[in-house]
Image (tube, rainbow, N blue to C red):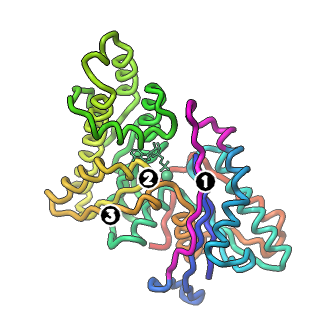
Amino acid sequence: MICLGIESTAHTFGIGIIRFEYNPHNNHITPTTIQILANCKASFTSKKAGMIPSQVADHHVDVCDTIIMQALQKANLKLKDIDLISYSASPGIGHTLRIGAMVARSLALKLKMHKLNVPVAPVNHCIAHLEIGRLLTKAKDPILLYVSGANTQVISYEAGKYRIIGETLDIGIGNFLDTLARELNLGFPGGPKIQELAKNGKKLIELPYSIKGMDMNFGGLLTYLKQLINQPGFFDEYTIEDLCFSVQETVFALMTEVAERALAHCDKNELLLGGGVACNTRLQEMCAIMCKERGAACYILPNEYNVDNGAMIAWLGILEHSAGNYITLRTNAIKNAKKIAIDPYLRTDEVEIKYR
Ligand code: AMP
Ligand code: MG
């Protein structure tokens, strides 16, 4: 079978295509047959502003046809070769999620016109980050440190659900870095720019370190930093490199601390990193040291699978489909197509996992 996955939760519109062998009689996916054929994307960027939802949605509308064609060409397939469609239905920005759902709906209806009944699987984006990690690494039952633009969660599988062991109480770590970068006139996305500057930081500025039980927050630190950089004379004493270095050391230390406690509490010995901020080499280094010291394995994906991508949505679609979680247009196509909808606020721990 061939699955086409659509990602559109935030800044990225992505299409992933995966081929796999599937036995519908016992719902078995043959692991050795799984092949990622394409993983194409286009991401919204901005020199001055951050993400304005309506602008990002316009971006996705502009690029969606091109990215679909690119992915099909890369996979050397035609649209009618697709047997299963999946899309990010939750969580994310309503404006942009809706574009992905509309693309899924349009493709399914188009295929239906060619008398092809292609099932459509809605999937949860956060869980997709974890499942692509289990597919591409040797991790079997990892704690996921999921650090992206909008989300910062430490996730563990327990009794049929992915439980959130710790999380941000306000903004996601990526949004924190992006907002700080905007204050410093570095443009969007800011995380990679902060990483580059941090490499040349020399002085460590002591900053507030805020952990509440297993949860974190970054809003207070952001306000503190805004005041700090606007203080007269601050940049006479410190460079922007010192600031970026100190920020990274502080926020990554507290995320690593929560991840370590999650490993201990849940009695697990594998840590997986996911989300755009997991591209950060300093965070990777801190997590690897922490894991080594406690005898755990630390799994880090290629950046292509850390950032939002269509391949992870295709893979979770395949898993959800094998558990019977899909919408079919077999009968009353127009009415059923309306079920291809979105759920912007659905949390990771609200999804029942039936395929594990
Ligand atoms: P996602 O929402 O998972 O696609 O992640 C997007 C976020 O990742 C944005 O906030 C980026 O600033 C951040 N990001 C990407 N690369 C890096 C990096 N090398 N270091 C820190 N943050 C990064
Ligand atoms: Mg993400």
| Residue 276, position as x, y percentages in the image | 44, 50
Split into 4 quadrants, where in the image is the C terminus? bottom left
In the image, residue 63 above or below residue 236? below
Q: For ligand 1, tell me if the residue under mark 1 lies within 8 Å.
A: no
Give the labeled residue for mark 1.
Answer: 42
Sequence-first tag of 3 and 1: 1
In the image, residue 72 above or below residue 58? below
| Residue 16, position as x, y percentages in the image | 58, 67
Query: Residue 169's quadrant in the figure?
Result: top left
Q: Are marks 2 and 1 in contact (CB under 8 Å)?
A: no
Give the labeled residue for mark 2.
Answer: 275
In the image, residue 75 above or below residue 131? below
Of residues 281 and 237, the one nearer the viewer is: 237
Q: For ligand 2, tell me if the residue under mark 3 lies within 8 Å.
A: no
Q: Residue at x 31, y 51 (%)?
A: 281
Identify the amino acid type marked 3: Pro
Residue 50 among those drawn in magenta: yes
Give the labeled residue for mark 3.
Answer: 142
**How many residues crowd around disc 1 within 10 Å: few (fewer than 14), some, or many (20 or more)?**
some
Q: How many marks?
A: 3
Q: CA distance from mark 2 to mark 1?
A: 16 Å
Q: Nearer the viewer, mark 3 or mark 1?
A: 1
Residue 85 among those drawn in magenta: no
Identify the amino acid type marked 2: Gly
Split into 4 quadrants, where in the image is the N terminus? bottom right
